Amino acid sequence: MFSRSTAAAIRILGRRQGPQARNFGAAAAFGTAGAATWGLSAQRERATRCEADPVVVGTAVLGGAVGALGGFFYGKSKADAVQEKYATYWPRKIMMVFGAPGAGKGTQGPKIVDMLDIPQLSTGDMLREAVAAGTEIGKKAKDVMASGALVSDDIVIGIIADRIKADDCKNGFILDGFPRTVAQSKALDAMLATTGEAVSLVMAFDVDPAVLEERVCGRWIDKASGRSYHVKYASPKSMKVGPDGKPIPDTMKDDITGDKLFQRPDDTAEALKKRLDGYKNQTVPILDHYAPRGIVKNIDGGAPIAAVWAEVKAKLANGTK
């Protein structure tokens, strides 16, 4: 399809720059080949002449140069974008996201996943997957759970070690719900160190407790679909307020199905206080554990959603404070 010289150029470019460059080189070569084919066709129409029309030859050469140049710059712009993204967010991003209930992890986590194309790994999901797959570590976990005992940190670390070898984790991953203690943090660090890696980013969402109470205690949920409403920020159309300023429970209905909404048992001021105490006692020491490495980034989770996301994006980049 290509001339020997063109094919050789593609091979050289591929050896020097990798798979993307081979694609770009091919794009340039197609431009050259197309222009050259046009020129040769024109030459055949002038078969009665002894020499090729210099205008035709010149046009073919010029077309080839334009095609090659276009392919090069198109390829270069894409390569630069990929290289910039790699330099900004990788090598392998190993993240943790912390925040008290209602701090915004559930809103921002999926956005990080979509942006970086890395999975968010829940210890509960990984445990169930390992048991279902019948892996060696999964069998150990199954036996422990069958006995009614709690799964040990060693087993959880083993499950994580297996899971992060999967192809979807090659660029990184976000740990969700782990670690919960400093001891687990140290065990995780030791496991990652066996492959020369370490946690690269710990993102902590900070929100004033009064704001958290308003967020959490105002949530109402549709059980069937999981759709979430809020009495202040996203109330259902059916909501009516009583003399005390609080929503009347019988009027809280899903906008789509009309089914009655409900509040989670722990979405109360009393339950929230206990959960915040647990977060302070368990999670804050983990942040202190990683803080000396300069990888803990605090996010103002009390800001508007768009502003929170802007800060998250800025602090996802390597080397930011």
Image (tube, rainbow, N blue to C red):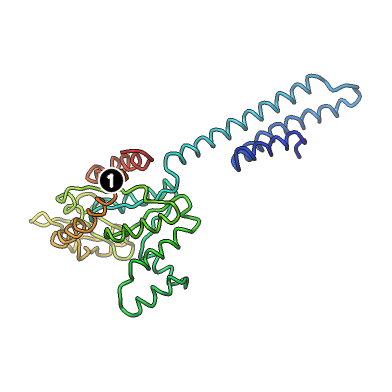
Count of numbered circles on the image: 1
> Residue beneath label 1, please?
292
Horizontal arrangement in the rendering, residue 315 relative to residue 6 (left or right): left
Q: Image quadrant of residue 4?
A: top right
Which quadrant is home to the C terminus? top left
Q: Amino acid at mark 1?
A: Pro
User: SS at mark 1?
Assistant: helix
State the residue at coordinates (19%, 52%).
212
Instruction: Give the residue furthest to the left.
Output: 243
Q: Residues within 10 Å of mark 1 (few under 14, many from 20)?
A: few
Horizontal arrangement in the rendering, residue 66 relative to residue 140 (left or right): right
Residue 254 pos. (x, y %) = 28, 60
Question: Does 209 appear above or below 266?
Answer: above
Residue 286 pos. (x, y %) = 26, 54
Q: Image quadrant of residue 79?
A: top right
State the residue at coordinates (32%, 39%).
310
Which quadrant is home to the N terminus? top right
Residue placed most toward the observer, 242 or 145: 145
State the residue at coordinates (42%, 39%).
88
